Image: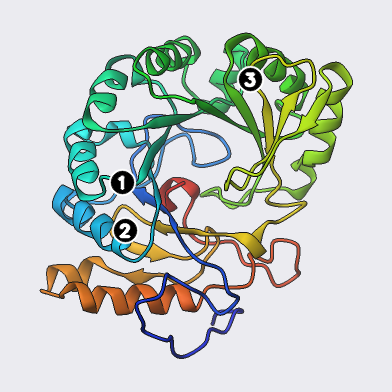
């Protein structure tokens, strides 16, 4: 039984995607695969997970249809995610179809970057606007420990390829885990100043497949900012419609930093995000315990109006918040790679 009872009905109108708390959902995370070529310790076991069969993954046409529908319902930005999206076969062709379905939206992609050295230019040519690259350590041995892959050099090469291809501004996501990479936050700030890419530090969240998350390993964003500010003074930046709280360097240097304080300072009251998993399940919250199946109706002949009703019902029932800091919090069964970042 869900610990978050939902309203039983939604007002089906031509209004934007609205929930009962007045939040408008206009940002969509679209997962194109559950597979990943890394094995990050905070996400999945070393042997990986049981991947979905190919016929359960949404086709290019299904993904494009859903995106077209969500844009009609008010979505203004879409982020292509996975798993690791670059392992989806013929990804540039898919991006071209998504761009055709949604010509006016901001389209970005979150990736581990290891395949960008050969994919950045084709993706840019297909209509992708920019990329966010996950990078949790600048030390080769620690990067290998955290990802279980000796691939730091390839990721850095991928970032350079993305910049050369015009997939900018590039954002870097760094998950900070106490006792693991907390000591690198100032070095990341220095790297940001040198390369001009904003680094966003993400608090360690309970989204691992093995459910081994420890709250004691959460490094509060306030502590991260304090450590950086002591070396490179920071100035608060204006809002950018992202969950990150952003800062620029007081001396005018390039780059910048941001923090995503999902655990210590949740931003649920302003959340505007929706997620579609690789097999077509709609989630109104990263930590949702309930999903709405869009794939089965699509494959059974549902028209767009039928899908719209399912979507509006899901959004209308969105929780007030994820309740990580409450005793009744229940971690979702799926890991981050299966949900879609």
Where disc 1 sits, the SS reads: loop
Which residue matches tag 3? 255
Label located before the other in sequence (2 or 3): 2
Few, some or many residues within 10 Å of mark 1 (<14, 14–19, 20+)? few
Instruction: Judge by depth and name the residue closer to the eye, 68 or 118.
Output: 68
Q: Looking at the rendering, in which quadrant would you find the N terminus?
A: bottom right
Q: Report the Cα–Cα distance between label 2 and label 1.
A: 9 Å
* Residue linked to disc 1: 104
Q: Disc 1 or 3, which lies upstream in sequence?
A: 1
Question: Cα distance, mark 2 to mark 3?
Answer: 31 Å
328 relative position to 280: left or right: right
Q: CA distance from mark 1 to mark 3?
A: 27 Å
- Closer to us: 90 or 338: 90
Under tag 3, what secondary structure? loop
Crowding near pointer 3: few (<14 within 10 Å), some, many (20+)?
A: many
Splitting the image into 4 quarters, where does residue 330 fall? bottom right
Disc 2 + disc 1, Cβ < 8 Å: yes
- Is residue 81 visible in the rendered image? The answer is no
Query: Residue drawn at (57%, 20%), measured in percent from left and top?
Result: 197
The tag earlier along the polypeptide, 2 or 1, is 2
- Confirm whether residue 40 shows in the render: yes
Q: Position of residue 138 (x, y in %)?
A: 61, 15
Name the spot of residue 187 as percent of width and height, x first.
Answer: 72, 15
Element at badge 2? helix
Q: Residues at badges 1 and 3 in contact (C-beta under 8 Å)?
A: no
For this orientation, the residue located farthest to the right is: 230
Left or right of 232 on screen, residue 149:
left
Q: Is residue 212 above or below residue 18?
A: above
Instruction: Kindly indicate the quadrant of the structure image that contains residue 141.
Output: top right
Q: Residue 78 location, x and y as percent? A: 38, 47
The residue carrying mark 2 is: 71
């Amino acid at each position: 039984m869900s610990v978050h009872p939902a309203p039983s009905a939604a007002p089906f109108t031509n209004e934007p995607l609205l929930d009962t708390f007045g939040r408008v959902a206009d940002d969509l995370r679209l997962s194109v695969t559950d597979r990943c070529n890394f094995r990050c310790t905070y996400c999945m076991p070393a042997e990986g997970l049981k991947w979905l069969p190919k016929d359960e993954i949404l086709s290019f046409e299904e993904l494009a249809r859903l995106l077209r529908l969500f844009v009609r319902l008010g979505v203004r930005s879409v982020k292509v995610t996975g798993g690791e999206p670059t392992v989806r076969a013929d990804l540039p062709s898919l991006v071209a179809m998504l761009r055709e379905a949604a010509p006016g939206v901001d389209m970005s992609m979150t990736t581990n970057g290891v395949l960008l050295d050969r994919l950045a230019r084709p993706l840019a040519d297909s209509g992708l606007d920019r990329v966010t690259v996950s990078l949790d350590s600048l030390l080769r041995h620690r990067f290998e420990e955290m990802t279980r892959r000796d691939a730091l050099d390839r990721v850095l090469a991928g970032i350079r390829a993305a910049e050369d291809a015009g997939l900018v501004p590039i954002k870097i996501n760094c998950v900070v885990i106490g006792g693991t990479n907390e000591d690198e936050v100032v070095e990341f700030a220095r790297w940001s100043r040198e390369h001009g890419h904003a680094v966003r530090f993400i608090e360690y969240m309970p989204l691992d497949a093995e459910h081994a998350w420890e709250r004691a390993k959460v490094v509060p964003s306030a502590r991260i900012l304090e450590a950086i500010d002591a070396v490179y003074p920071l100035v608060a930046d204006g809002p950018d419609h992202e969950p990150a709280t952003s800062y620029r360097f007081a001396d005018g240097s390039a780059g910048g930093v941001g923090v995503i304080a999902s655990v210590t300072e949740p931003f649920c009251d302003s959340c505007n995000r929706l997620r579609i998993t690789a097999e077509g399940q709609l989630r109104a919250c990263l930590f949702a315990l309930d999903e709405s199946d869009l794939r089965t109706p699509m494959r059974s002949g549902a028209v767009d109006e039928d899908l719209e009703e399912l979507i509006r019902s899901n959004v209308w029932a969105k929780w007030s918040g994820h309740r990580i800091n409450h005793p009744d919090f229940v971690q979702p069964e799926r890991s981050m790679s299966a949900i879609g970042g």
